[in-house]
Image (tube, rainbow, N blue to C red):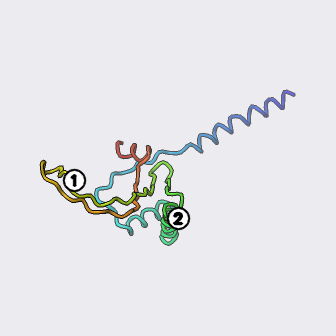
Amino acid sequence: MAAKKAAAKKKAPAKKAAAKKAAPVEKKIKAVKERYTKTQMLTQISENTELSKKQVQSVLDELSDMIEGHIKKRAVGEFVLPGLLKVTSVKKPAKKARKNVPNPFKPGELMDVAAKPASVQVKIRPLKKLKDMATN
C-alpha cells in the first residue's frame, strides 16, 4: 500500500507543472501610430498566426458573410463578436409629412417637414473588452 501512495504523490506535482505551462502569457501590444490598410492587416495577421494570406482573407470573407446572414432582412437582426462588439439592425418606421410645425431654430416661424420612408439602420455597440482596450 505504501508504494501506491508514493506513486499517487508523484503524479500530483506533474499536473501542477502542466498547469503552469498551459497558463497564457500576456502579449505586449504596441500602440499603432497610423491606420492600417487591408493589406497591412492581412500581412500582420498571417505573420502572427502562421496562416497564409489567402487563408486569412477567406476567414475575413466568411466573417463578413456571417454578419450579413445575421442582420439581413427577415434574419435575427443582431450579430455578436464575443467580447468586442455587437452589430444590430434597427427598423425605423415611415414618418408622414407635417405642415406648419414650429421651427426649433427660429422661434415664431413655422415650417413644413417632409415625409420619410421606412428604413433600416445598422448600430454597432462596443462591448466591455473593447471599452477596456481603449482605456488601457
Residue plotted at (40% across, 64% down): 41
Where is residue 136 drawn, in percent x and y?
36, 42
Mark 1 or mark 2, which has the lower sequence index? 2
In-image side of 32 versus 110 (left or right): right
Mark 1 crowdedness (10 Å alpha carbons): few <14, some 14-19, many ≥20:
few
Give the image quarter of residue 112.
bottom left
Where is residue 89 drawn, in percent x and y?
44, 57
In-image side of 73 versus 103 (left or right): right
Residue 129 in view of the camera: yes
Mark number, residue 133: none
Query: Which residue appears farthest toward the right when viewing the image?
Result: 1
Residue plotted at (74% across, 34% down): 10
Which amino acid type corresponds to the residue marked 2 in the rendered image?
Gly
What is the CA distance from the residue labelled 1 to the residue labelled 2? 41 Å
Which amino acid type corresponds to the residue marked 1 in the rendered image?
Val
Give the image quarter of residue 1.
top right
Residue plotted at (53% across, 45% down): 24
Task: Tell me the residue that label 2 is attached to.
Answer: 69
Task: Tell me the residue that label 1 is attached to.
Answer: 101
Q: Determine whether the residue tagged by mark 1 lies in a helix, strand or loop.
A: strand
Query: Which residue appears farthest toward the top when viewing the image?
Result: 2
Q: Nearer the viewer, residue 124 or 115?
A: 115
